[in-house]
Image: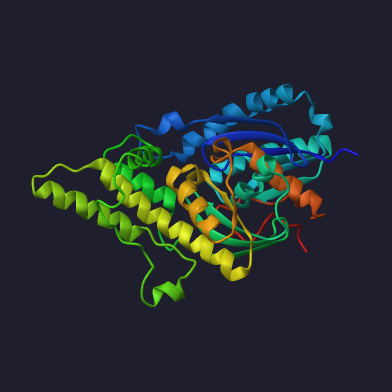
């Protein structure tokens, strides 16, 4: 007997994603993005993103169905990102999902987009472990999660107290006058720099903070330290070496992320760390986490680069996990939740 075919709809920010998943098999993952429209603004413009979703949804859906060789009638359930994300963007996807589910008579699941970044790993590496540490790293999130069951039991162990890792990378990119978005450019330059040339601080790593915030992150002070270093160097009439700045900054961020993720796994007795989110594409994060996990006897599951950014496959994968666990579909009246907590896997029906 075939496993249910899940249609996933992603519209949390600037990507319109459609994914079709059956169990651990990905039939198709189609994405349309409006990223190129924001370079001159230096950031996402919510109104533009919402309009782009409206324009892209039907063409992206039709292209995905054609590529997979299925029709809407073949779909068994529909999953849509319910949050976190931009309210306007989320609204477009949710309204489209409700219209499809209503017209087709299919169950609808409003899923947690962030947890979907972890669920998508099953499409690359097979069924998820029963229990694992989730390291979610993106432009808006840097969190350590204890996942006992990705569909029903997710606990937040810690997170960033200010900037997320991806956000900090983009801000340092702006300090160095790199093109938008700055994160990938900072990562590229860091690979050519000397990680020992500039010693930048690690937030929450000393004194009482080391235990009080043992699974938390803070990157705002690090960003300020980079800004002061650049200002001081230029004030002395010296040239700033962007490769060394990026290398030192990248090392500070990734040292914190990887050390605390490994500590969380060891403290909780988990044997596996699953990583998800846009920042999981960072080259130093991948290398350092693999190195530290191996030294501690842990397994690391990192998504292929194509699954790092927002995509419909992650929403469909999360939907398939909810169906697997027998979680009840969402009520029709759920609304976008831009601050959806990471302990909430889906929009549950009203009691």
Residue 94, can we see it? Answer: no
- Name the foreground residue: 351 vs 151: 151
**Does 68 appear above or below 318?**
above
Does residue 300 show up?
yes
Q: Residue furthest left?
A: 237
Left/right of residue 151 with respect to residue 86 in the rendered view: right
Task: In this rendered view, identify the residue nearer to me: 322 or 290.
Answer: 290
Residue occupying image coordinates x 43% and y 29% = 36
User: What residue do we see at 58% from left, 34% from top?
Assistant: 16
Decide which of 336, 135 is in the foreground and name it: 135
The residue sitting at the bottom extreme is 208
Answer left or right for 323 relative to 290. right
Residue 36 or residue 212, whichever sits in front = 212
The residue drawn where x is 67% and y is 56% is 345
Residue 129, given in percent of the width and then of the height, sits at 70, 55
Identify the residue at horizontal 91%, vertical 39% (top origin).
Answer: 1
Q: Position of residue 63 (x, y in %)?
A: 67, 23
46 relative position to 319: left or right: left
List the single residue furthest toward the right: 1
Total numbered circles? 0
Q: Position of residue 117 (x, y in %)?
A: 60, 47
Q: Quadrant of the C terminus?
A: bottom right
Q: Position of residue 80 (x, y in %)?
A: 68, 43
Q: How is the image coloured?
A: rainbow
């Amino acid at each position: 007997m075939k496993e249910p075919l899940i249609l996933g709809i992603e519209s949390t920010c600037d990507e319109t994603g459609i994914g079709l998943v059956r169990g651990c098999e990905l039939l198709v993952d189609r994405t349309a993005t409006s990223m190129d429209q924001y370079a001159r603004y230096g950031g996402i413009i919510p109104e533009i993103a919402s309009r782009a979703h409206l324009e892209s949804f039907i063409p992206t859906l039709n292209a995905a169905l054609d590529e997979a060789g299925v029709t809407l009638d073949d779909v068994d359930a529909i999953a849509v990102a319910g949050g976190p994300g931009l309210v306007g963007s989320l609204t477009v996807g949710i309204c489209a999902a409700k219209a499809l589910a209503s017209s087709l008579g299919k169950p609808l699941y409003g899923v947690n987009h962030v947890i979907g970044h972890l669920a998508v790993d099953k499409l690359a590496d097979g069924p998820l472990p029963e229990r694992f540490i989730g390291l979610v790293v993106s432009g808006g999130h840097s969190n350590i999660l204890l996942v006992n069951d990705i569909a029903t039991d997710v606990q937040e162990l810690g997170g960033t107290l200010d900037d997320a890792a991806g956000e900090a990378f983009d801000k340092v990119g702006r300090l160095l006058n790199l093109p938008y978005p700055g994160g990938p450019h900072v990562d590229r330059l860091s690979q050519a720099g000397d990680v020992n040339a500039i010693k930048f601080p690690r937030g929450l790593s000393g004194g009482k903070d080391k235990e009080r915030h043992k699974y938390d992150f803070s990157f705002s002070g690090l960003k300020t330290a980079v800004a002061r270093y650049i200002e001081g160097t230029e004030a002395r009439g010296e040239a700033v070496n962007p490769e060394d700045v990026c290398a030192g900054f990248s090392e500070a961020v990734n040292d914190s992320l990887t050390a605390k993720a490994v500590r969380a796994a060891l403290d909780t007795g988990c044997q596996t760390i699953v990583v998800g989110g846009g920042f999981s594409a960072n080259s130093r994060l991948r290398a350092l986490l693999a190195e530290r996990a191996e030294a501690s006897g842990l397994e690391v599951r990192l998504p292929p680069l194509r699954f790092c950014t927002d995509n419909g496959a992650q929403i469909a994968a999360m939907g398939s996990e909810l169906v697997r666990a027998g979680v009840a579909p969402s009520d029709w009246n759920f609304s976008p939740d831009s601050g959806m907590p990471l302990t909430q896997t889906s929009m549950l029906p009203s009691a």
